[in-house]
Amino acid sequence: MSSGSVEELLDASIGTHFSGLRLDGLTPRKSEMEQPTTSTADNVNRQPFVIGVAGGAAAGKTTVCDMIIEQLHDQRVVLVSQDSFYHGLTDEELEQVYEYNFDHPDAFDTKLLLSCMENLRHGKAVDIPNYDYKTHRNVLPKRKVNPSDVIILEGILVFHDPRVRDLMNMKIFVDTDADIRLARRIGRDTVERGRDIKTVLDQYSKFVKPAFDDFILPTKKYADIIIPRGADNHVAIDLIVQHIHTKLGQHNLCKIYSNLYVIQSTFQIRGMHTLIRDANTTKHDFIFYADRLIRLVVEHGLGHLPFTEKQVITPTGSVYTGVDFCKRLCGISVIRSGESMENALRACCKGVKIGKILIHREGDNGQQLIYENLPKDISDRHVLLLDPILGTGNSAFQAISLLLRKGVPESNIIFLNLISAPQGIHVVCKNFPRLKIVTSEIETGLNEDWRVVPGMGEFGDRYFGTDDD
């Protein structure tokens, strides 16, 4: 696998254990703890994780898919082949079957493919055609496919139509040498489909190779991941499976909680996460890249604030209809890690008021509120709660509960952090369903010491230079 392919792979990305809560002097609101919320899984559109696998004929796409499915044994996975959606040939076309181009985009019923994929994405079972390669027609029975956590769509031209590409969360191109593909095609078509070698070679030179050059190879540019050597590239497939596991963890939690938002991952974001998570990163670099990530999270969080329409006159004398920023806003940092996010908020919001909350940890399951300094009119403001790490959710629970006691409407609170453990997400989202969480990445979970893993260590110590070093 090339270095570029690995970088593209990293460009793309749980448990449900609940930590105990013991909050001194605070009792969770009964209505929030016991009543079902609109954020539960039953009321959310459960769309699956869709993976597209393209490449030339006999490139090894199906084998790659089978290897991915085998390693995703703990997920419900279904494989859909574009070949199932070939148009059945008419009697006239069958008479000239060797003149028919099966590698052209028009050979497929893309409209039916889109319909089936949309139904699967929205939790509906579908009947997929059963195409017979010897008669070149659809036969009965059709294949019944039920909704799944993961849908893998494979085929030579699955990247050709932008409507199909838009359905995919991950796009993989299997890149195999042309001689190997031809050798495999000869073996497959002569043994499995009853064709003679001359017919296979004639079809290859007349249709298969030109179609690959004209329609298939150009779609390689749309791939998120390119796998050289196909199924022989075990390292690439292992990395893909690890990445899918990571994305499924984030994907599933976002399906469960409609008030959870994970900013879209890019290579830049993954690269910054790599640097700030590295124990050997210098303090200077840690601060620099943490600040960049924090700025992205803050900008994303600001996008969830209410806006009002506003018209302005441009220098050309034209009218531009835009929006006006939310004026009643403040930031509240959870001391002291949360203070690292204040500069980014000030850079985005000129003159914004910032308050403080200090929560002292008493053991691993209890928190004690030590200090608060909040704007007097906080109940009339939208609040950005700042804390880089969401772990057990205990500190967040107490900070949010304090804001509610001060009269801040729950729907006016946006909780911003860099990384979130699933346990903390469950605690916050279940108890405060009208609050919004914005994070840049969801972690694997908590270790036996209740620390976030893989995590980035004690954020405040690393940021403010008070660690042991």
Image (tube, grey):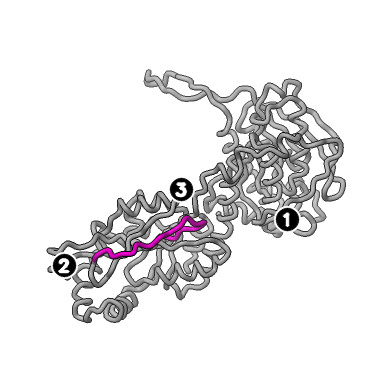
Q: Magenta part mainly helix, strand or loop?
A: strand
Expressed as whole percent of the image width and height from the top left, the position of residue 300 reads 57, 38
In the image, the segment drawn in magenta is 137-153
Label 2: few (<14), some (14–19) or many (≥20) C-alpha neighbours in 10 Å: some
Residue type, mark 1 in image: Leu
Residue type, mark 2 in image: Leu
Residue 94's mark?
A: 2
- Determine which residue is flagged by label 1: 446
**Earlier along the polypeptide chain: callout 2 or callout 1?**
2
Displayed quadrant of residue 318 = top left
Query: Disc 2 to disc 1, how far (Cα)?
Result: 62 Å
Foreground disc of the pair 2, 1: 2
Query: Disc 3 to disc 2, how far (Cα)?
Result: 37 Å
Expressed as whole percent of the image width and height from the top left, the position of residue 35 reads 68, 38
Residue in view at x 84 percent, y 33 percent: 371
- Determine which residue is flagged by label 3: 122
Judging from the image, what secondary structure is the residue with disc 1 in? Answer: strand
